[in-house]
Structures are given as C-alpha cells and as structure tokens.
Image (cartoon, helix red, strand yellow):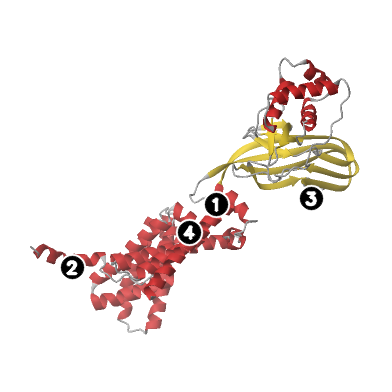
Amino acid sequence: MSRVLFRGLILFLALAGLLIAWLRHADTGMPFLPGKQAQVWILEARIDFVADGPVMLSLNIPEQPPGFRIISEQTASPGYGFSIVEEDGRRRGEWTISEASGPQTLYYNVHMVADRDAVGGEEVPLIRRAPAVLWKEPELTAARQLLAAARARASTPESLAREIIRELTSTDPSQNAALLLASHQRTDLIERLLHDTGIPARISMGLLLKDARRNQSLTPIIEIFTGKRWVAFDPATGRQGMPDNMLLWNRGDQFLTDLVGGYDTQVSFSMIRRAMPMVNLSSAAHEGGRFRLLSIHTLPIEQQSVFKLLLLVPIAALVTVFMRVLVGLHTSGTFMPILIALAFLQTTLLPGLTTFIAIVAIGLLLRSYLSRLNLLLVARIATIIVIVVFLMGALSLIGYQLGFNTGMTVAFFPIIIIAWTIERMSILWEEEGPREVLIQGGGSLAVAVLAFVLIDNSLVGHLSFNFPELNLVVIAIIMAIGKYTGYRLLELRRFRAMEERSP
C-alpha cells in the first residue's frame, strides 16, 4: 500500500506541474519555447480640434475586436485628464480640461496582436428587429422592385445582403438602383434596404491595417444579424466576412467623437507593425490574468533577478542526484556542485574552472602548512576563509592586469563552501591519499559542469522562470530516483571480470 501511495504521489506531482503550466500557457499566452515572436500592431489615433473654454471630448475606442487582442493602451494629452468609461455598452476614452483655447491635439495609442481565437465582445443584436423604413415616391417603388429582384436570387440573409450590395455597386446599375443612389449615400442605402427586408443591420467602422501608414481614416462596414451572430460585408464589393487586416473600431451608428467646448474635430490614424517577443506580451497578460498571484512577473525587477537564479537550483539538484545515485560519481559534499554550477553562470565556464582549481590547489598547499601548527578546527577554518578571500582578490587583480574580464565575478564563488572543501580535501588527503582527493574533486567538477551546461540552456532558463510549477515535475523525478537501490553505472565495471570468465 505504501508503494502504491508513493507512486500515486509522484504521478500527482508530475501531472499537477504539467497541468498548471498548460493552464498558464492558455491563460497568458506564455510560449513554451524561448525567442518566439508575434507581430504587434501599434495604432495611434490623433484628434485635432479647436477649443473654446472648458473641454470634454470622448472618442469611441475598440473593445475586444474580433481577430485581435488588446495588449496595452495609453494616451498623450498634456494638461488633460483622461479616463476610459462605459457608455451605453460602448467603451469610450474621455479627455477633460477646465480651460483651453485654440488648436488642440490629443493622441490615443493602443498595442494589438492578431489572435484568430479572439471573438468580438458583442454577439447579440442591439435591436431585436429591424426598424420600419419610410420611403417617398418614387423611391418606394424603386426600393420594392430592387428588393424583389434581390429576393428572387437569394435564399438566406447573407445571400440577400450580397445581392443588394451587388445591385448598388454594379458598374451598370439598374434604373431603380440609380434612382436610389441619386439621393442616398450607398452605405446608408444598403442599411435602409436591409431594414426594409426585416434584417437587423448596422453600419460599423473598421480600420484597414497597413504597415507604416499615416493619416488613415476609418472604412464603413455593413453588419447584419443572422439570428445567431453578426456578419460583416464590404459595402464596396459585397465581400462577406471581416478581412484579416481589418480592425473593427466602432460598432453601430454611434458617433466616433463627441466634443463639448470646441469645434472642427478631425480624427486620423497612424499605424506600424513590429515584431515583439511573446514573453513581453504574456507578461502584460499576467497583470490581469488568473495567474497574477502565481506570477513572478509581478515582482520588482530586482527580486525577479534573484528568483531567476534560484529557480535554476532544482535543475542542478536533479543533475546532482542523477549523477550520484544512478551513475555513482563521488563528490566533495552532497550539493557543492550546485553552488559551483551557479557560480559558473556568473564567471562563465572556462574562467570559472580555472579560478576554482587555482584557489583549491593553493588552499590545499597552505592548509598542509596549517596542519603542522595544530590549530583548533574553528580557528583553522576561519584562517582558510581569510586566505580564500585574499586569493580571490589576488586572482582578480592578476586577471585585470592581464586584460581578462574575470574581475569581481570570482566573488560569486561560495567562499565558506570553498573553505570547507579545502578543509575536507585536506583531511581526505591525510586519511585516504591523493587519489581519493582527485576522485571526489574531479567528480564535483564533472557534476558542476554538467549542471552548468543544463541550466545555461536558454530553454531550461525560460521554462524554469516562466513556468515555476514545472519544479513539481522535478520533485517527482528526484523522489523517483531516491527510491532506486540497484547497482550504479560505475559499479558495473566490478563485475566485468566475472562476465569474461563465464563460458
């Protein structure tokens, strides 16, 4: 029963870590692979107007546009107060100032990333049925005849909308279409004709996205409600569906801007597309996501740097456990290789190895002299610590004079651990001889190098920092290895002779 519970615990830890990591990925968009980038659209709305006294200006701004996900938004409006308000189910940016006069310019900036899974925030019609349309003669007769011809070629609301648009955009329009277009704007006319058929319709405004464009304006879009969802049509071509490069900015017949205390409002749009790491985008999503309390990204940068290093310790511990339990390498101290591997992250591998070997070798020579003085253990260890500090300082000065950029990085070596290592190796030398010192010292360096190679990998660093719950999987693996009681890999050589003698 205890074995079953143990295996169940290991399985639970591993599955919990993987499940939480997947949920974090789905909620924030954090990629599992480092270096992945996304194309981000940076859109800027410029509002120009002439102020005359207290000003209150509101701008209709997008909310959950289909096919896009808002990453961040900000405004540049010196002297103005700004807030985002909900008004009749719409989202609007509102600028206010107590007194202004003359030409004014305000900016609204939003960062968006294309997301095919993003759906519009509105999936129900603003109106349950189309309003009644009043026509004057001879427009009434022309509208009825045009709709009769369109109905004859249509079978669904979508096909009827396409046929109406085709009638009004033809290069050779019929007499009925020409009559109606003479007194109505085409987009408004399409909406009125659709209402006349009983189909709820509205005119929305979209922004056509093209890289590095300035002074762009919104494009009208016809949307009809089919009973389940809104379907968009291009009033110029009759094409159904929202183009991939079209951002739905303004829904319905609400004015784009509303100005009190001024006149002559003009709105223009500029846009640029940039590649941005997915990690940055998901960091912004952490701020308001469900994983906010479990996100290291919400900590100050200084603390994030500390955790980025600490979260590599479980990986180095896994390497140490694997090499000691399964391979059978002997190390000087149980987890000293972990500290050496972390130090190598700061010093880089070759300078770190050189510094470590030099300090331990010189320390052993000085320790052999101290043993002749018959000092107490505490005094001997303290003396070694001071010597190690002097050795680090000397190596730093020598490296600086020779032009090597080792400098203060040697200070990242754990001084106390190195002092104890020198003490233990010295005792081991006296009791077991130099061969055992080389075996344990070499084993420690071998494990430290393997751990360094692993934790220095960009993928490992990315996963450990952005998905810390994966350490539950590491714990499960370490616990599973901890139950191993068989032969170690290096012990198999002892039985090679028996294998050679067997017939």
Of callouts 1 and 3, the N-terminal one: 1
Kind of residue sitting beneath label 4: Leu
Vertically, is 268 above or below 236?
below
**How far is the residue under mark 1 from the one under mark 4?**
14 Å
Vertically, is 170 above or below 388?
above
Residue 168 sits in which quadrant?
Answer: top right
Of residue 470 and residue 1, the one placed in the foreground of this image is 1
Q: Residue at 76% of width from left, 16% of height from top?
A: 174
Of callouts 4 and 2, the N-terminal one: 4
Q: Quadrant of the N terminus?
A: bottom left
Q: Quadrant of the C terminus?
A: bottom left
The residue that mark 4 highlights is 18
Kind of residue sitting beneath label 1: Met
Q: Nearer the viewer, mark 4 or mark 3?
A: 4
Of callouts 1 and 4, the N-terminal one: 4
Mark 2 closeness class: few <14, some 14–19, many ≥20 residues within 10 Å: few
The residue that mark 2 highlights is 494
Please say whether residue 78 is visible from this viewpoint.
no
* Residue 451 locus on image (x, y percent): 38, 60
The residue that mark 3 highlights is 85
Of callouts 2 and 3, the N-terminal one: 3
**How far is the residue under mark 4 from the one under mark 3?**
40 Å
Of residue 321 and residue 171, the one placed in the foreground of this image is 171
Q: Is residue 59 left or right of residue 371?
A: right
Q: Which mark is residue 30?
A: 1
Q: Residue at 37% of width from left, 73% of height from top?
A: 3
Vertically, is 79 above or below 209?
below
Q: Is residue 269 left or right of residue 495?
A: right
Q: Secondary structure at mark 2?
A: helix
* Residue 496 locus on image (x, y percent): 15, 64
Kind of residue sitting beneath label 3: Val
